[in-house]
Amino acid sequence: MKLEKILYVVLSSFVIITFVLFNFIFSPLSSNKENESGAKQIFLADNISSALRKVIDNFNAKYKGQIEVKTIDLPFEKFSTNERKELLARYLRNKSERIDIFAVDHIWVPRFAKWGKPLDQYFSLKEKNELLPYAFNTCKYDNKLIAIPLYIDIALMYYRDDLLAQLPNYKQNKKLLESSITWEDFIKIGNSFKNKKNYYSFEADDYEGLICAFLELVESNNAEILKNGKIELTKPEIEKSLQLLVDIVNKYQISPPEVVTYKETQAYNNFINENGLFLRGWPGFEHGELIRMTKNKNIIQNVKKIPVPHFDGNKQASIFGGWNLMISKFSDKTSESITFIKYLMSEESQKILFEEGGYLPIINKLYYDENYVNVNPDLKFYFDLFKTGVNRPAFENYSYISDIISYYANLAIKNQISVDEALSKAENIINSKNILIK
């Protein structure tokens, strides 16, 4: 009886907190969407970084008295990607006009398509061709343009060059790393690292970050999880992919056992605070968390980036990430929203987002501008890395599939069930369309 009461209290509290957050976050002070100067207000829901804030301020100054962008901030520090997804979905179901533009993880585009306005008619062929194809291709659903990219992401590996230099065969190892090292050689290097359990930090919590790491390995193994309309997870190549994540933690013990609770922030923290050698991360780490988490200039200066490892004899594969912008189908400020989105696509805005926020540009021009690339050599590294990029499968029910796979993959890494059992259970639940009760 006591347990039932505790569960009731916990569930009731969760519902109340969610309701309060939901109404607080998505309740702009102004509901008539017009400020005192007569400018039409449009509301943007996104993680409002300092770089994005600068672009918004520039836009508001340029269009003063005409259009004003107001923000609904959903910071990554407070909301996981899954939490942002559910908050947005719940809000849009209410068919309110309060949000005009909202940012979505590019893999959510199929799910949110029913709440977004088709955008083909607002963008010329020239404007579309200016967009980086890797990013632009994630904006389409059912042969319609339903979103516009804000920035693109791609998974990579960071390492501490000063710590690598303390190990045997430094020059040889560095050469292997820079040309894309195999997982087999990566593990061998780990065995010579004194701080062995903190050799490699990665995200293995039950959430989307684990799915990215897992699907990256599946792609490197030339495997697919979908065949003839059904999910197929019980294949040798897919089993090998999950087994590697399990073995990294339990057999080779080159990652801390706590990685099963790590999202990006925790993985980044471990890498910095425990003097880890390698970290699986995203481009924003260098411009954001690395600088915020440490004032140690030696650490900052010695953090280098390389492609993620790959299986011996197989291809390189790095998972694409990124965020796209959609216009709510319930918005009555479509013209103003399009004007703002086109401003975000401009060279001026893209340079600010990249130089001050670390957001990888979504316009081709910056990657082909030799003078700009010479000043910003990271662009060449990323442009080359894009060639190995792979996307997560664009299913309308992707979130359902991802939630189930991540749950069982996390249990396997915890050593609570075998790899075979994890993949078999996930496959059966998905294909039978059952509800997962965690």
Image (cartoon, grey):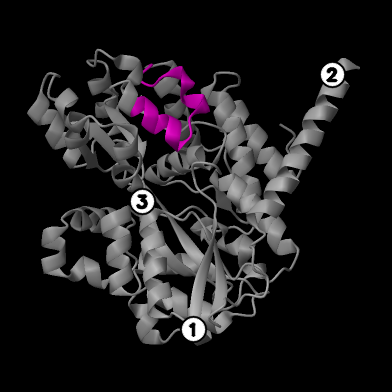
Q: Earlier in the sequence, mark 1 or mark 2?
A: 2
For residue 3, which numbered disc appears in the image? 2
Q: Which residue is mark 1?
A: 66
**Extreme top residue here?**
194
Please indicate, yes or no, whether residue 238 appears anywhere in the rendered image.
Answer: yes
Q: In the picture, which quadrant includes the N terminus?
A: top right
How far is the residue under mark 1 from the one under mark 2? Answer: 58 Å
Q: Which residue is mark 3?
A: 154
Tell whether position 339 is magenta. Answer: no
Label 2: state its secondary structure: helix
Q: Amino acid at mark 3?
A: Ile
In the displayed structure image, the side of residue 27 where residue 338 appears, left or right: left
Q: Nearer the viewer, mark 1 or mark 2?
A: 1
In the displayed structure image, the side of residue 147 where residue 314 appears, left or right: left
Please tell me which residue is depicted at 57% across the width and 51% down the height of the picture: 226
Label 1: state its secondary structure: loop
- Which residues lie in the magenta part? 253-271
How far is the residue under mark 1 from the one under mark 3? Answer: 37 Å
Please indicate, yes or no, whether residue 230 appears anywhere in the rendered image.
Answer: no
How many other residues sit within 10 Å of disc 3, few (<14), some (14-19) or many (≥20)? Answer: many
Tell whether position 258 is magenta. Answer: yes
Label 3: state its secondary structure: strand
In the displayed structure image, the side of residue 98 where residue 305 appears, left or right: left
Q: Eyeballing the image, is 334 above or below 152?
A: below
Q: Amino acid at mark 2?
A: Leu
- Which x, y percent locates residue 380? 19, 57
Please tell me which residue is depicted at 49% across the width and 54% down the height of the picture: 47
Which SS does the magenta portion mostly show? helix
- Which x, y percent locates residue 20? 72, 47
